[in-house]
Image: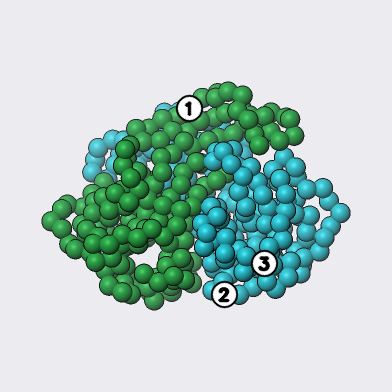
Chain colours: A cyan, B green
């Protein structure tokens, strides 16, 4: 157990914040902890067929490079995680999911963030007439599970939620 | 591509920092991004036998709860990732690994952090006469892979690096 003494300073964006806390450590000493206060998030593995999924290419500012990921985003205030998963899928790929199933909840960065990501699978996809969010998405790719497995073997998939989602689906099936 | 205009403010600890940047977005608008500047990190799956691993219970301040994880930590300046994996294993469990093998590198929180985690497996473990770092570790558990699989099925394992390390080992073997 570590206990907060006080918050020294904070950084805020419209959707989440970072805080520098002074804390009492387990051994009674004091120390500093950076703590990201983040809303819950969802990710969706969109099955466009039994063995193909849709992935998004995105520029990631903190990492300074483009990555290949499954669609994902932060849960809005008052929104249920499953609604969020449906909304993010639509905004990022233009597809509506006929079926959404819960896969797993995990914590991506437990050393400094309270973020939880709820992963879903989406199937029975239907193309809708919506514009894809160009502030976030560079391009869409339809890719076979076999090809994704090869990309993972080569170490090409960097994104944690994408790896976890795919591994859990592999062991459970769509 | 998103381009930094300037850093508005920063929070610092001895080992990493958080920055609030004003950036130009893909569509030409300006926005704010929180960016964690984090050293690389390593994690080790310590095989105490062919089908048992050692896990650590740790209180995670940002998450506000205890988690069951594989040993891990930040790479020190001038240290190679493999050395770091050996050091963290020794500090957190008291075991020295006769054999360390690279498993995978991934990015845990690409939305706001440049952290990369290098996962290794450790085997031929030997108990050393060292004190375990009590500021971080609550307890050690030796646990069968079968039991870990059950815990994952129940959704009990929250930690991303632990999930990814175990899934990749499952598909490749120790």
| The C terminus of chain B - image quarter | bottom left
Instruction: Estimate the x, y position of residue A3 in percent, counting from the top left.
Output: 34, 42
- Looking at the image, is mark 3 or mark 2 nearer the viewer? 3
Instruction: Estimate the x, y position of residue B73 in percent, counting from the top left.
Output: 34, 48
Q: Is residue A95 above or below residue B169?
A: above
Which numbered disc, 3 or 2, marks the residue that appears first in the sequence? 3
Instruction: Estimate the x, y position of residue B51 in percent, counting from the top left.
Output: 33, 75
Q: Are marks 3 and 2 on the same chain?
A: yes
**Res A152 label:** none
The chain containing the residue under callout 2 comes to A
Describe residue B126's horizontal placement relative to residue A120 as left or right.
left
Instruction: Estimate the x, y position of residue A36 in percent, counting from the top left.
Output: 49, 40
Residue on which disc 1 sits: B10
Tell me where residue B43 sits by quadrant. Answer: bottom left
The chain containing the residue under callout 1 comes to B
**Residue drawn at (63%, 68%) of the image:** A145
Tell me where residue B21 sits by quadrant. Answer: top right
**Residue drawn at (32%, 51%) of the image:** B82
Task: Specify few, some or many for label 3: CA neighbours under 10 Å numbering under 14, 14-19, or 20 or more.
Answer: some
Q: CA distance from mark 3 to mark 1?
A: 42 Å
The chain containing the residue under callout 3 comes to A
In terms of depth relative to the viewer, which is nearer, A117 or A151? A151
Tell me where residue A128 sits by quadrant. Answer: bottom right
Residue on which disc 3 sits: A144
**Residue drawn at (47%, 33%) of the image:** B18
**Residue drawn at (44%, 70%) of the image:** B172
Task: Specify few, some or many for label 2: CA neighbours under 10 Å numbering under 14, 14-19, or 20 or more.
Answer: few
Q: Are marks 3 and 2 in contact (CB under 8 Å)?
A: no
Q: Are marks 2 and 1 in contact (CB under 8 Å)?
A: no
**Res A172 label:** 2
Q: CA distance from mark 3 to mark 2?
A: 17 Å
């Amino acid at each position: 157990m570590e206990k907060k003494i006080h918050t020294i300073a904070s950084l805020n964006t419209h959707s989440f914040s970072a805080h520098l806390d002074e804390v009492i450590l387990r051994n009674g000493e004091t120390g500093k902890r950076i703590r990201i206060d983040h809303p819950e998030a969802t990710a969706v593995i969109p099955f466009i067929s039994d063995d193909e999924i849709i992935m998004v290419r995105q520029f990631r500012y903190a990492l300074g490079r483009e990555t290949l990921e499954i669609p994902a985003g932060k849960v809005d205030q008052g929104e249920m995680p499953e609604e969020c998963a449906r909304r993010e899928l639509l905004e990022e790929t233009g597809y509506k999911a006929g079926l959404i199933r819960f896969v797993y909840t995990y914590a991506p960065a437990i050393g400094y963030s309270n973020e939880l990501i709820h992963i879903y699978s989406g199937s029975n996809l239907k193309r809708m007439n919506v514009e894809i969010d160009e502030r976030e998405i560079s391009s869409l790719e339809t890719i076979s599970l076999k090809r994704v497995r090869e990309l993972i073997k080569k170490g090409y998939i960097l994104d944690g939620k994408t790896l976890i989602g795919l591994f859990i689906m592999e062991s459970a099936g769509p």
